[in-house]
């Protein structure tokens, strides 16, 4: 994310999303009631003759909208912001009508809010910093099965799962070796493609049971010598998707590089679940219970999903903003989880909001 201009006294921030993650951040930053400005294509009718021919001209114009709805279209790499036009060139006669602005990677957009909550400003700052931080690649592999995942600060993307039949070595070592060679080659093609595409992996973890992981890591470095020093070999129970999350839970990436956001989320949700299971009384969940803990100054960290923030009613969102602001005033931390990650999905089961407490509350 790139910040082009910022004037919080006027409630304005102008941004340019630089990748798909940034569009996701904007989806969670822009809410109904905000004002947004951007260049957009607008249908413009020119005269009665044009109307009769049913020809409508599209013109690139700079519009201001009062936001009513925001949709994120991941597969088209696009954010769609629908609202009522409040500012437009005089010659297009569009004031008061509806319009949808499509925000793509590289689109400059100005956002105006009546108030910018600290947790939203923090999210934007983290998005700016995240763009400078490299990602990690995880290859979970065993004989005949591999899962390749790209890990960013806020997301885990399974880019490929490869399953192939490998003949037993004892029955026919020649066919076995040929099958392994093809299997390694197919996995390598996916790894290479993603490395070339991202060009900023700080670490590549090859994990799995047995010796296949060791053999593949050597194969990988032999094919791409520039990866020497970036490849870490680690144990995992399989070559499936679960092995990717095993690697993240153990903090393998952060031991070799800077801690990824998704690792931090997993650590926090596991701490919450551990305390809950031990019945220590130092956790709270659900908006009403968390609010009580905040009022008493007992909250160390609030865990909340972006879906909870985004899809709450206007009244509920106002209450959430108050809870989060009060938490930060009392030196508590706010951690916003992506609802589509494993940790976020677990948090959703507790109403999308929970808290780690500094001490046990009297009525717990």
Image (cartoon, grey):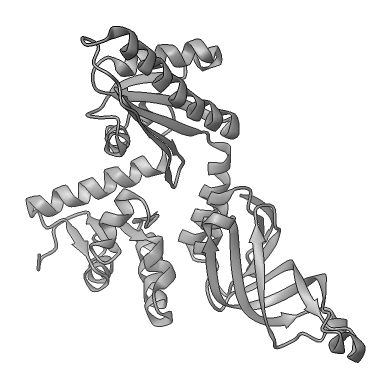
- Quadrant for residue 56, please give it: bottom right
Q: Position of residue 319 (x, y in %)?
A: 37, 76
When the figure is inspected, residue 196 is found, relative to residue 81, above or below; the finding is above
Which residue is located at x 20 percent, y 62 percent? 284
Q: Residue 261 vs residue 40: left or right?
A: left
- Whether residue 299 is visible here, answered yes or no, is no
Q: x and y percent of residue 322 in the render?
A: 39, 72
Task: Please report the residue visible at 45 percent of the width from the left and 25 percent of the height from the top.
Answer: 186
Camera-side residue of 304 and 188:
188
- The vertical placement of 346 against 53, above or below, is above
Instruction: Name above or below for residue 32 compared with residue 238.
Output: below
The residue closer to the viewer here, 12 or 214, is 214
Q: How many numbered marks are there?
A: 0
Outermost residue, bottom side: 48
The quadrant of the rendering that contains the C terminus is bottom left
Residue 58 can be seen, yes or no: yes
Q: Please report the residue visible at 41 percent of the width from the left and 15 percent of the height from the top.
A: 181
| Residue 180, percent from left and from top | 36, 17
Q: Quadrant of residue 219?
A: top left
> Would residue 363 appear left or right of 192 to someone viewing this image?
left
Query: Quarter-wise, where is residue 360 in the image?
Result: bottom left
Residue 245 left/right relative to 39:
left
Q: Which residue is drawn at the image coordinates 14% and 63% (left, top)?
A: 361
């Amino acid at each position: 994310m790139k910040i082009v201009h910022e004037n919080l006294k006027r409630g304005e921030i102008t941004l340019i999303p630089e990748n798909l993650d940034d569009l996701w951040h904007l989806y969670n930053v822009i809410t109904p009631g905000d004002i947004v400005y951007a260049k957009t294509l607008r249908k413009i009718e020119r005269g009665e003759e044009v109307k009769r021919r049913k020809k409508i001209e599209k013109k690139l114009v700079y519009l201001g909208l009062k936001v009513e709805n925001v949709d994120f279209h991941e597969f088209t790499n696009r954010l769609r912001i629908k609202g009522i036009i409040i500012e437009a060139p005089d010659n297009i006669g569009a004031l008061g009508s509806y319009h949808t602005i499509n925000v793509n990677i590289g689109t400059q957009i100005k956002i105006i809010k009546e108030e910018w909550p600290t947790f939203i400003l923090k999210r934007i700052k983290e998005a700016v910093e995240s763009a400078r931080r490299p990602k990690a690649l995880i290859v979970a592999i065993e004989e005949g099965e591999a899962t390749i995942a790209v890990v960013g600060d806020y997301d885990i993307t399974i880019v490929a799962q490869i399953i192939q039949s490998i003949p037993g070595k004892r029955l026919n070592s020649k066919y076995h070796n040929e099958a392994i060679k093809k299997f390694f080659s197919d996995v390598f093609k996916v790894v290479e493609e993603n490395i070339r595409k991202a060009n900023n992996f700080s670490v590549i973890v090859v994990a799995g049971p047995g010796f296949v992981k060791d053999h593949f890591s050597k194969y990988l470095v032999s094919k791409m010598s520039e990866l020497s020093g970036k490849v870490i070999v680690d144990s995992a129970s399989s070559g499936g998707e679960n092995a990717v999350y095993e690697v993240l839970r153990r903090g393998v990436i952060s031991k070799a590089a800077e801690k990824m956001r998704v690792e931090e989320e997993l650590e926090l949700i596991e701490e919450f679940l551990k305390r809950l299971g031990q019945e220590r009384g130092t956790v709270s969940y659900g908006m009403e219970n968390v609010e009580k803990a905040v009022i008493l100054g007992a909250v160390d960290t609030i865990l909340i999903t972006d879906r909870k923030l985004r899809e709450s009613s206007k009244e509920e969102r106002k209450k959430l903003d108050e809870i989060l602001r009060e938490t930060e005033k009392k030196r508590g931390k706010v951690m916003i989880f992506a609802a589509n990650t494993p940790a976020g999905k677990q948090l959703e089961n507790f109403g999308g909001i929970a808290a780690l407490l500094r001490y046990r509350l009297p009525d717990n």
